[in-house]
Image (cartoon, helix red, strand yellow):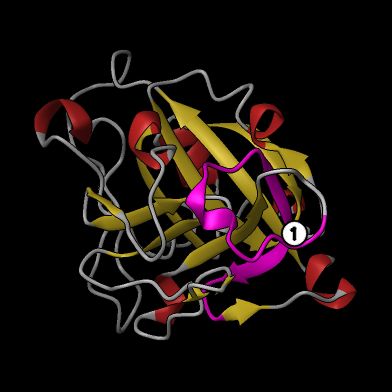
Amino acid sequence: MNTVLNTWGWTIAYQGSYGDKVSIADMFANATGDYVMLAAARTGTMANPTMTFDVLAAALKTDVLTYTAFNQTTSTNGTNFYYNGSAMGFALGGDPINQGSLTQGTADVGVSHGEQRLSWNTSVAGGAYEPMGYTQSPNFVMPGYRSGNNAGSTDAFYSSFTRYVLTANAGPVAPSAITAPAPAGLALGIIGIGSLLGCGGFRRRKAAPAA
């Protein structure tokens, strides 16, 4: 986390439990930069900045918050983002998402590269479950559902994981790319925001231990 915040220059715009219900407006109110990062970490990580995010991905805010229909995605920076009234989040570029059935839309339950998936339950009206909420853009993020291969809708899960939205601008950052070393078995790297000036975008992986 220290690397993301202090080396790459990201700022936390929102953090909250996976058990929280929060409006989209409130979640992104402080995400004033051109770019946003969606991330998740085990609760308590901020008390120890040498710990890591569980999973994260970043792109232009306009791409992350672009409405996508059932099982459709916005492909950008090596990542498939999705955003509708059933769920929002991301999967590895090239991997499809699985939002259940047309009559029972859900968060993404896809299994391919599951450790690189993030999915948050969403809602249009903010009330009871909306089976076809995916037909509209969301207005609320609801409790649950997924941080990598960790998923659930129980109090135990809610208390174990925290959601993050981070924000940044490309302008003030030097154009040199900052690439974190990938852990064993994971080839993808994430490029710091400075690379947006020189390389045009981010790639995404599980975060490496902070420097």
Q: Residue at x 48, y 61 (%)?
A: 209
Q: Residue furthest top?
A: 172
| Numbered label tally | 1
For image coordinates 21% across by 56% down, the residue present is 78
- The one of 198 and 21 positioned closer to us in this rendering: 21
Highlighted magenta segment, given as a residue range: 128-149
- Position in image of residue 42 (x %, y %): 69, 65
Asked if the stretch drawn in magenta spans residue 109, the answer is no
Q: Is residue 51 visible?
A: no
> Which residue is farthest front?
103
In the displayed structure, 83 sits above or below 70; it is: above
Q: Residue at x 60, y 29 (%)?
A: 28
Kindly tell me whether residue 160 is visible in this rendering.
yes
Residue 5, x across and y down, in percent: 52, 37
Density class for disc 1 (Cα within 10 Å; few <14, some 14-19, many ≥20) is many
Q: Where residue 175 sits: x, y (%)? A: 18, 25
Quarter of the image for residue 105 reads: bottom right
Q: Position of residue 148 (x, y in %)?
A: 52, 73
Residue under the point 52% across and 45% down: 136
Query: Relative to 115, is 68 above or below?
Result: above
Circle 1 sits in a helix, a strand or a loop, which is it? Answer: loop
Amino acid at dot 1: Tyr
Quarter of the image for residue 162 reads bottom right
The residue lying furthest to the right in this view is 155
Observer-nearest residue: 163 or 125? Answer: 125
Write down the residue under mark 1.
18
**Is 56 left, or right, of 196 in this rendering?**
right
Asked if residue 67 lies left or right of residue 148, the reply is: left
Q: Residue furthest left?
A: 198
Q: Nearer the viewer, residue 61 or 69?
A: 69
